[in-house]
Amino acid sequence: MRTLLVVVLVACLTATALGQTREQTVRNDRQRVEAEGFWIYNDLPRAFEEAKRTGKPIVVVLRCLPCHECVKLDDNLVERDPLIRILLSQFVCVRQVSTNGLDLGLFQYDTDQSFAVFFLNADKTIYGRFGTRSHRTEWADDVSLNGLAKALEGALDLHKEHASVKASLAGKRGQPMEFATPEQYPSLKRRYTSQLDWKGNVVKSCIHCHQIGDAQREYYWQAGKPIPDKVLWPYPHPKSLGLIMDPNEMATVKAVDAGSPAAAAGLREGDVIETFNGQPMLSLADMQWVLHNADPAGARLPMKVRRGGQTHELTLTLAKDWRRKGEITWRVSTWGLRRMATGGLLLETASDNQRRSLKLPADNMALHVKHVGKYGAHAAAGKAGFRVGDILIEFDGKRTLRTEQDALTHVVTTRKPGDRVPVKLIRNGKTLTLTLPVQR
């Protein structure tokens, strides 16, 4: 399988071999790309003007500017895969290397990605999205070059039929976010502007994608408001509903877990999901967009599925609190939640051997302290006396919080900054009770 993971590894090795600083990598990258002229570099207004002039659709690749793992990701997509290059030549191609000044009314996506793609019309109709992951480092189960090629082809097909399909694409635009651009969020406003600082330190002037999610959560938390489920559990992965998709296709079912909501909907291996909640599907990211905007309290989402040459109409039913079944601890932005809720602790579910050695019941909470932060607000737990190796067995009076995610979300949905949370733990065979401060 030609996976994006391979491309990431190549890029990482290339940057390391060159021994460049992040600042050098970014500046060299800009110089080379602008000299080649294939991509419009960090200039969305120019791209929309070019699309109006030529009648071409637009492809926008957003990727982390200083990150060695992905700074050359889209270079390799173009230079190493001839099919991708041919398809991209039919688009106005934009490389957006920062989110400073980004229109958040238009560009809404999973900001824990370091590589996200939009396909658009010059009138700002969104044809679709591409790019997802459900693990901190492993991408192979979620994306591939074959899948990207299929999404590009699908976007070109929608562009040809733009007038007739435009109404069905309306749902691919989201409602306005809390602020129009990233730098307007309070936690970013004092540190960043709407432009990169090419005359100074360009890397430090860049707003990374994940900082948007951080800033959104901070906005609610600092205001003393509960963080909405949609913000805590963004862009739910279909696998949390028992639906495993084929990364090499646009929206084709690879497997369905028995007893899952996907199975209850009647989905089967090999089904091609043509529309989901009325929207044409180009990728797994498109499916996540529909789920992201579904009601956290439950919903019934219609699907049109092609199976064996016939079209079937199915309905995916989402139960109450369905969104909370997703996994968030792989996300970079979870570090902000760890600061707020656990004072910088990194927790993992205790192993069976650890549980047996401590004679803990199978249904009792047992979270192993894997790491204790040492700096700034992330050092709060360490200052409160927590140590690596501690086993947490009760948290805020509860013994049912069985995962780190359970503990984090309990605090940020039920507590407020300034509260103090009692924690019972086992250390060297002894039971202790310490207190965690809930932080801003």
Image (tube, helix red, strand yellow):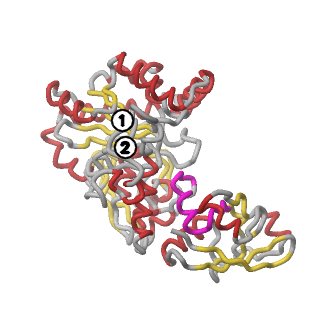
Q: Residue at x 50, y 31 (%)?
A: 23
- Whether residue 53 sits left or right of residue 431 in the image: it is left
Residue position for label 1: 96
Confirm whether the magenta stretch covers residue 350: no
Q: Residue at x 73, y 68 (%)?
A: 386
Magenta segment range? 330-347
Answer whether labels 1 and 2 touch (C-beta < 8 Å).
Answer: yes
Residue kind at label 1, given as amino acid type = Gln
Residue position for label 2: 99
Q: Element under label 1?
A: strand
From what the image shows, is residue 51 above or below residue 369?
above
Q: Position of residue 228 (x, y in %)?
A: 40, 68
Q: Which mark is residue 66?
A: none
- Whether residue 281 sits left or right of residue 79 in the image: it is left
Q: Residue at x 82, y 63 (%)?
A: 353
Confirm whether the magenta stretch covers residue 339: yes
Q: Which residue is drawn at 62% across and 61% down?
A: 378
Q: Nearer the viewer, residue 228 or 181?
A: 181
Answer whether residue 264 is visible to the viewer in this image. Answer: no
Q: Nearer the viewer, residue 269 or 351?
A: 351
Quadrant position of residue 372: bottom right
Bin the neighbour count of mark 2 within 10 Å (Cα to Cα): few under 14, some 14-19, many 20 and up.
many
